[in-house]
Amino acid sequence: MDRFQEMQIFTRIVDRRSFTQAAEDLNLPRATVTNSIKRLETRLGVRLLERTTRHVKPTHDGDAYYQRCTRLLADLEETEEAFRETDPQGRLRVNMQETLARYFVMPRLGQFLARYPRVELFIGSGDHFVDLVREGIDCVLRAGELADSSMVARRVALLEQVTCASPAYLERHGDPASIDALLDGHQAVNYLSPASGRAHPLEFALPDGVRNITLPGPVAVNGAELYTAGAVAGLGLVQVPRYRVREQLANGELCVVLADQPPPPMPVSVLYPQSRQLALRVRAFADWLVQAFADAG
């Protein structure tokens, strides 16, 4: 086993905090992974990993070695890809919000797989915080403004948003003629941030900036489908990307409110760790996402 493979095994163990999961990721027997670390520690003369029955974490020396290994492996992959006349290949693990996957990615995914047949793609869905390195994920696709992060972020789209409510809600509360009118007895289906647990305010794009309005509401949710369903049920106002409620707007279940003062467009971004930004398969997938959203209009 060459030294670069030993480095790859070691860094994957640190990323995943598990010998077993590292072995599965690399398609290697667990015994091979264990023996590789034993040989590596013997050759270096230091202990790299602290092992318990439940956890694996790097020692102080292991953490320093990990930092150097990730840089070397990234440089190696970039160098080989620069001279290798081949398409992207290997396993690509992606996590994305389910609505983005359903409306934009999955209907067009065959195009990506046809273009890059040597990429083995695994897609997970969720709207929660994902520790990409710890969970062995190469990149995530997220909608909304991004919190400060050590991840590399690339904008792939801006989605038009609308404020809307059901006809039954508007019959009870009236169709607001202005943003200020919202403060006179209107309510919202409040969407809770998965990161902070606080409700997102309603946002309106004005010539001098964005105005936030926080309204009371009878229900708070933390899922996109529940959010839309609450509006259809007449529980309050919501702000959503237009694509998500196109059908409800067409059949009259929902109506656009304050159309001349819409919410700001919602950014969609792909994020990946610094160590993955040079991987050809990650760059190819990010490039394809930009095109997929553009094709969807």
Image (spheres, rainbow, N blue to C red):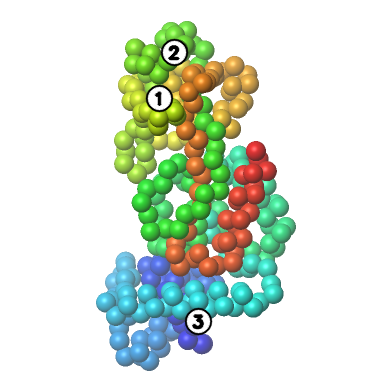
| Residue holding disc 1 | 189
* Residues at marks 3 and 1 touching, judged by CB atoms closer than 8 Å: no
At a point 40% along the width and 18% down the height, the residue shown is 179
What x and y, as percent, mark residue 291? 65, 49
Q: Quadrant of residue 107?
A: top right
Q: Residue furthest front?
A: 208
Q: Which amino acid type is shown beneath numbered disc 2? A: Pro
* Residue 244 visible (yes or no): no
* Residue 252 visible (yes or no): yes
| Residue holding disc 3 | 5
What x and y, as percent, mark residue 52? 29, 72
| Residue holding disc 2 | 176
Tally of numbered discs: 3
At a point 50% along the width and 69% down the height, the residue shown is 24
Question: How many residues crowd around disc 3 within 10 Å: few (fewer than 14), some, or many (20 or more)?
Answer: few
For the residues labelled 2 and 1, the Cα–Cα distance comes to 16 Å
Q: Which amino acid type is shown beneath numbered disc 3? A: Gln
Q: In which quarter of the image is residue 196?
A: top left
* Residues at marks 2 and 1 touching, judged by CB atoms closer than 8 Å: no
